[in-house]
Image (cartoon, rainbow, N blue to C red):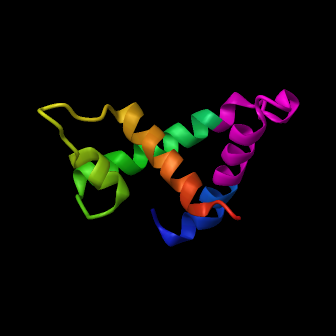
Amino acid sequence: MPISDAPQLKAWSEDFAEMLGNFQHNPDRVPRDPSQRRTNDRYFKSAIREIRNHPREGLIHSFLAAELEGDRFTEDEVIANTIITMVGGLERR
């Protein structure tokens, strides 16, 4: 991901981490705006298209190239794994 997108990715990561940490104990804290999910999906689908058209090393490329006995991640699985990795990598302790 471009460095210039870091602030937006960090904000998404914090929102997602908060949702994961609170949904069972405080369901009111779960984001209620489904448009954020659609925005995230569009962002990562665009990134996937860019990497497919212009391959370069990185997390998304690794997920796209991963294969086990002919089985590969779907685009949705690439997005989900990218988000989970991003959240884990940006989480504060």
Residue 21 sits inside the magenta stretch: yes
As drawn, which residue projects farthest toward the left? 69
Secondary structure mostly seen in magenta is helix
Range of magenta residues: 12-36
- Relative image position of residue 3 (x, y in whole percent): 51, 71
Vertical relation: 75 (above or below) 55: above
Report the residue at 19% width, 31% height from top.
71
Question: In the rendered image, which quarter is residue 78 located in?
Answer: top left
Magenta-span inclusion, residue 81:
no
Residue at the (55%, 70%) spot, across then down: 4
Instruction: Name which quarter of the figure residue 27 lies in.
Output: top right
Q: Is residue 73 left or right of residue 8?
A: left
Is residue 6 positioned above or below 51 on the image? below
Q: Image height check: is 12 above or below 68?
A: below
Where the N terminus falls, by quadrant? bottom left
61 or 51: which is nearer to us? 61
Figure quadrant of the C terminus:
bottom right
- Quadrant in the picture for residue 66: top left
Q: Is residue 22 above or below residue 90?
A: above
- x, y (%) of residue 11? 69, 56
Residue 43 spot, x, y in % from top left? 50, 46
Tell me what residue is drawn at x 69 percent, y 64 percent. 92
Q: Give percent across and percent down for residue 41.
A: 51, 38
